[in-house]
Amino acid sequence: MSSNFQWDTFAEAFPYVLQGLGMTVGLTFACFGFALIFGFIWILLRRLPLKSLVWISTWVMEFIRSTPPLVQLFFIYYAWPVIPVVGVTLEPFTCAVLGIGIHYSTYIGEIYRSGIDSVDKGQWEASTALNFSTIDKWKRIIIPQAIPPTIPMLGNYFIIMFKEVPLASTIGVGGILFMANSYGSLHFAYLEPLTIVGIIFFILSYPSSILIKKLEVKMNTRFDKNAILSKSKKKSIQGMNLEGSDHIV
Amino acid sequence: MFFIGTDFQSDDVPIFLNHFSFYNIQKKGMINISAIIEIIPQLLRGLGITVTVLLASAIIAYIVAFVAGLSRVSKNVILNKVAGIYVEIFRGTSLIVQLFWLYYAIPMLFGIQLGSNWWTGVIAIGLNYGAYLTEVVRGSILAVDKGQTEAAIALNMSSFQKMRLIILPQAVRMMLPEVGNYTIQMMKATSLVSLIGMRDILYYGDIMRSTNLSQAPLVYVVVLFTYFILALPFIWLTRKGESLSKKGVVSQ
C-alpha cells in the first residue's frame, strides 16, 4: 500500500474506475424502474377488500423497509438458489435489481399513496357520479392528478438509489466501487481509486439534487402543493423526507 | 421462509438436503425448530457489535446534527458555510463509499490508528446520518412559526433565550418522527460494518452461510428477523413521535 496520497496513481486509476460508471448508472435506472412498477403492487395490496390481507401486506412492507438492503441482497444472491422448488440461480445484476428495487419499492409505494391521498375527495365523488368504471376512474381522474405532484419526491429517491447501488459491488456487479476495489487489490492502492469514486458520486448527485429542488419549486406553482403537503405530513412516513427539502413549506 | 411449513415427503427431498450438517431434517421433511435454535445463538454473538455501533453512531449523529443544524440557521457566515459544505459532501456521496474511504484514509492520511474498525464504522455512519439529520434540525427550526420569534423579541429575550426557551422546545418535537426514521436507517446501515471485518450479526450469518450454503435461506431469514426485532422499538417510537410532535407546536 502506498504510504500517502499520490496523484500519479490517481491519474492512472481514473480511467480504470470510470469503466464501471456505465454499469452503476444502468443499474440505478434498472432498480428505479423496477421500484416504480413494484410500488404500484404495494398500492394494490393496500386496497384489497380483505382486512387481514391489508394488514399482512402492511407488515411485509414494514419488514422490508426496516431490514438492511444488504442482507436482502445476500438473501437473493446466496439463499434463493438453494431454496427447493422455487429457487433459481440469478445473475448478480438481476439480484441487485430485485434486491434494491424491492427494498425501495416500499418507499415509492408510500409516495404513491401520499399522492393518491392528496387527490380531493370531490374528484372521487365526481367520477362516481359520472358513472366512470373503476379502471376509467383511476386512469383518467385519480392517477393523472396523484402522480405528477410526487415527481420531485420520486426524483429524490432516484438520487438516493443511485447512492445505494454500490451495495451491489458486494455480490460482484462491476460498478465504480467494484472497479475501485479491484484496482486497489491489483496495485495495493485503495485510497486514490476510492477518492475517485467519491468524486464521481458527488459530481453526479449534487447537480441532480439542485435540479430536483428547482423542479419542486416549479411543481409547487403548478399544483396546489400546500394541500398535498399538509396531508402527507399527517401521514409522515419513514424516510419520506430523506433529502430534507420538504421541510420548508 | 419456504422451508418452514413446507411439507416435503421424504422422497421429494432434493439430494443436497441430505447433506445438512447443521440441523437434521425429520422424516417428514419439515425443518425443525432445533435448526433455528442452533442458528440464533451463533448470530447473537454479533449482537453486541451491532448494538454498540448503532448507539455510538446515533449519539455522534445527534450531536453533529445539532451543532451543524444550529450553524446552518446562524447568521455567522463562516459557520453557516462550513456546515453547508459538510452536509453536501456527506449527502452527495454514498455511505458505503465513505466507509471504505475512511477505512483506508484514516490510517494513511492522518497517521492515526484508531485501534479497531469499530471506530471507522461509527465515524462513517455517524457523520453520514449526521448530515441528513442536520437538514432535519434546520428544517424544524425554520418551520417554527415566525410569530414565535417576534413574540420572543417583543418580550425582550436575548437570542440565546429565544432559542432555548421558545424555538428549540417546539422544533425538537417536530423533529421526533424524522429522528426515529433516521435511527432505523442507521440501524440498517450498521450491517455495512461487516464489510470492513467487524463481527456483527451479518458477519456471523455470512460465516454460517459460507460453511454450509444449503442452510443459507434459514440463516438469512433469521438475520432479517433479528434486524426487524431491533427496529421494532424505533418503529413504535416513530409512530408515537408523530402524535407527540403535534402537541404544543405553532408551525406555519
Image (tube, coloured by chain):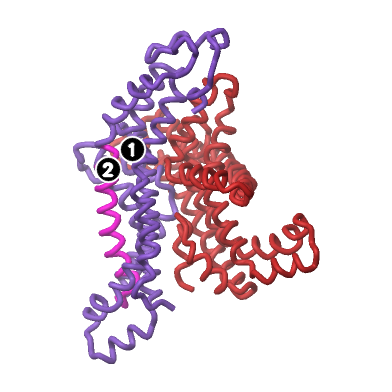
Chain colours: A red, B purple
Q: Residue at x 46, y 40 (%)?
A: A69
Q: Are marks 1 and 2 in contact (CB under 8 Å)?
A: yes
Q: Nearer the viewer, residue A74 or B96?
A: A74
Q: Amino acid at mark 2?
A: Val
Q: Nearer the viewer, residue B32 or A187?
A: B32
Q: Which residues are magenta?
A: B49-76
Tell me the SS state at disc 1: helix
Q: Amino acid at mark 1?
A: Val
Image position, residue A32 (x, y; %): 59, 47
Q: Nearer the viewer, residue B64 or A68?
A: A68
Q: Residue at x 76, y 55 (%)?
A: A135
Image position, residue B189 (x, y; %): 38, 44
Residue carrying label 1: B193
Is the stretch drawn in magenta largely helix, strand or loop?
A: helix
**Res. B53 mark:** 2
Compared with residue A242, is residue B148 higher up or lower down, i.e. above or below? Answer: below
Q: Quadrant of residue A145?
A: bottom right
